[in-house]
Image (spheres, helix red, strand yellow):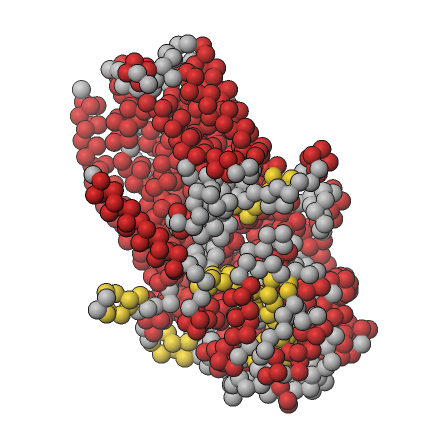
Amino acid sequence: MTDTTIKATHPVLIFWIIAGWVGFCLLPWFMVEDGIWSFVWLVDGYPFDEDHAPAAFLIGQGEKLWLAPLLVPLALPLLILGKPKSDPQYARILILAGALGFGWLITQGFSIGIRGFNFDWMKALFGEPKIRQFGMGYGAMICATAFLFLLTQGIAARGSINGDVFVVSAIGGVITIVTVFVFFPIAKMLFAAFVTEDGAYSVSVFASKFFDDRLWGLGCFAGAKCGAAWNSLFLAVLVGFITTVLGLCFALVVTRSGFRFKRGMRALTVLPIITPPFVIGLALILLFGLSGSVTRFVAEIFGVQPTRWLYGMPGVLIAQTLAFTPIAFLVLIGVVEGVSPSMEEAAQTLRANRWQTFKTVSLPLMRPGLANAFLLGFIESMADFGNPLVLGGNFDVLSTEIFFAIVGAQYDQGRAAVLAMVLLFFTLSAFYAQRAWLGKKSYTTVSGKGDAGVHPLMPRGLAIPVLGIAVAWAVFTAVVYGMIIYGSIVELWGVDNSLTFKHYVTAFSVRFEEEGIRWTGAAWDSFWTTITIAGIAAPLTAAVGLVTAYLLTRQSFAGKNAFEFGTMLSFAIPGTVIGVSYILAFNVPPIEITGTGVILVVSFIFRNMPVGVRAGIASMSQLDKSLDESSLTLGANSWQTFRRVILPLLRPAILAALVYSFVRAMTAISAVIFLVSAEYDMATSYIIGRVENNDYGLAIAYSTTLIFVMLAAVGMLQILVGRVQIGRRTQLGAEKTT
Amino acid sequence: MKNLTTTLAGSLIAFAASLSAAQAEKLTFYCSAQEDWCQLMARSFEDATGIDVNMTRKSSGETFAQIRAESSNPKGDVWWGGTGDPHLQAAEEGLTMEYVSPMRDQLHDWAISQAESAGNKTIGIYSGALGYGYNSDLLAANSLPEPACWKDLLKPEYKGHVQMANPNSSGTAYTTLASMVQIFGEDDGFKFMKGLHSNINQYTKSGSAPIKAAGRGENTIGIVFMHDAVKQAVSGFPVKVVAPCEGTGYEIGSMSIIDGARNEEEAKKFYDWALSPEAQNLALEVNAFQVPSNKNAETSESAPDMSQIKLIDYDFKKYGSSDERKRLLQKWDEEVSVLPQ
């Protein structure tokens, strides 16, 4: 290579060409059995041993010859070294090489599996030679990435999106990973619903599983049981309604009453984020179960026969209402505050009394918020797994039925897939309704104009019941959480109520020895795994979320709406569905990651990505576009602008996304329970195991510890973000005055 | 520069040597017993032999499905624990390997007959009899009589006090169903299940959940394997264990070596070790009160005495077959589960 070619060719292009060759010639092509971080392969027959050989060595030995065609797209980009970007050949060859390479990689990956050809028509066409391959390893992954970015650079060179390599690559990258880790597993799951026991496809299998009485039966009107689908739907509607009403009560008390402990009530909003999924259920059992304290107390005083009323619909309803009311509160507080006081003042000036004002002005303006809160409660209830698991009794709901279809003695993946489809249909409908209905109408009353009014207080007739309900519910919530702490320090609940710290000792004991600290507690293993996995997932989630948010707010490209819908979709996919679909999609080549830590990280990234996207969109839309423009005018490219201008201004959003995805990863259970393995056990699945073993003390002690760990994380965020924002506010204030 | 290269190369070789020494022997161990027992077995085997154990715990149904899926490229070596049916099924499908252990003459007859019925492709490692347990405090509080037989559970005063697992989702509950059919005959067996249905307060998903609920005082009587009930009693809960007077069915926890195992020698070592009294005594450390298959292994004082229990001649071949299983479950679904309670 001469000096001129180096100057002319973009270093990023050179980087990806080299990466492609390294992936092909130097790194093991297939998944290394001992795990991603194990480098045993380096000494175990590398580079000739078939298990860890790079593709080039395999072909050299006459093995896996279907990888050989990849040499063509790897070699093609070498032709354009030294050619200027403007040369039409440049774009054409890059696109050709990228598309060919990526396409061939995927085609061969899906066509040839552990047992030779995966498709019957290929067997018919080529016979059944003795060929097989395992999941893709580093080599294949890096090669695939290289092809992808060669393709995006080619597209950029053709002039798409102003020829901006960074933006095109970012779009290509996000689309690819969302397709691989969201759409592909879901599609795979949809297919699994049609598979018969001997592996053929049949519609009648689907029909027999779909029109099952256990799913759609209406026996509950005749004294027997109803199907899981109706149960889930009915429960979700009730939970959505009740949480919205309670959330509204709280929001009204906080914004429109003279109640003294408003600030304390605001603290409620943080609870659902930091509560491990089933502790509320456990606390309810300890209070209202057949041998619960309240049940016993009532039985003694009134001489009533204790019953098992808690197990079933009532228990799940109470637990979910406790868990999700704060979410409705969080949504509605913004809405209730957002209703313009000037409108209410106008109504009052027109001689409406407080009650009329509330009914005809304030309430209608809150309508979208109420609908939003209802739908959120609906989706959360549908997806909830922990509470029905602990309190469900004979009341079957979809999320737990999915779990038992896969882990129980039935082991029926097809049934799990069908149930997951029904659940997905419900949540997606709600998600779609929320976007279609609320997205278009504008109820905004917050405008740039000064709006210095004061919200009127609630009418008295309303204030008293609202305050009563809110205070009663807040006290109830406090009692339940108090119970959680108390439950962690009694010997054996219900049998021996003496106080002890032994559960904490069993879980978190440490011994100081000469070699250092020894983590002897039973919980440390899963605790550190959880912290590590959550710690790895959090920055990746934030990164993917922010890049996506940047594309959505700052760039315009064809198919942007579909792109947005696709990235937000995983919010509406319940965790159990993700769990099932990941098992179906990723335990066979080409991507074989079940039983590893990678699958946990990946599932967290895509479960929590919408949070990062939302945080990013919210704060990016506050940054004026002229900032980007001035940076671009001064000659920076879009990557430099993103890194030097946008990112620093987004620090609070980044922090929030980081902490939130970290905390969510710690409390997630529904997807996790399908994906954990002996080596990578997570805190929540460890706790569920303890609960199943009747070890309530340890389970609650562990949960309490998690609550405090997460509280610390959230608190730290408050301090950090608070400081950053104060810094910004003065700057913005200064800008405004000029 | 040259020096640096030599040093680097030297240390790489040393590193390599240490790595290859470390990975000399290994065993991939599929375990279908309770988690802590699996962990203990894996660690103890490592301590006893120095072989690296890579353990995966899954229910016996899942493990069976996994072994079947991997049959053309087996990844596991040995499969230990879990109820016998899927082990027998795996033997029938040729997924597991024939092996006659030198330890065999130390075993109880039931363990050997399990092996013989499967062409020596599996073997019994422990057994547990079906029965029920009750919470004595709750029984007294509700002034209920103490039950002693299966038929006692049909009495109307126990309405809403009995819990069992759903046979569709739990192997324990299926064993219950199959045992009733074998004790009372098919017609009367189903009559029994229907009578029981009206007293049941909840069909749980997992097999041992009913007795755990009884231990916590959330349920009065739970139909489970007796060793699970004993475990609750030993943990300090007021649970009494009952071996029903009519006789009862049982399970045989089994072990098999996977056909085409990559580490066959290590798998055989594990197999022999797992049949030894030392390995079977480990069960007591994790409160597993099943009866061990080695005659010389210790049994806990709290464990049910198998010689005092009337065991029926359980037909594992017939009731373990998937056709019979499907037929009984469907009949239960259609005739029992739909009745009003």
Q: Is residue A709 depicted above or below B146 in this figure?
A: above
Q: Residue furthest right?
A: B187
The quadrant where residue B97 appears: bottom right
Q: Position of residue B12 (x, y in %)?
A: 31, 49
Q: Is residue A641 depicted above or below A414 in this figure?
A: above
Residue drawn at point x = 31 percent, y = 65 percent = A519
Task: Name the quadrant of the C terminus of chain A.
Answer: top left
A166 left or right, relative to A592: left
Residue drawn at point x = 28 percent, y = 66 percent = A518
| Depth check, front residue: B334 or A525 | A525
Q: Position of residue A699 (x, y in %)?
A: 42, 66
How many numbered marks appear?
0
Residue drawn at point x = 19 percent, y = 28 percent = A731
Task: Name the quadrant of the N terminus of chain A.
Answer: top left
- Would residue B54 be visible to someone looking at this image? yes
Q: Is residue A149 depicted above or below B320 in this figure?
A: above
Residue drawn at point x = 38 percent, y = 17 percent = A81
Q: Position of residue A36 (x, y in %)?
A: 42, 47
Q: Position of residue B280 (x, y in %)?
A: 52, 78
| Depth check, front residue: A104 or B99 | B99
- Would residue B58 be visible to someone looking at this image? no
| Depth check, front residue: B67 or A163 | B67
A319 left or right, relative to A644: right
Q: Is residue B336 depicted above or below A672 in this figure?
A: below
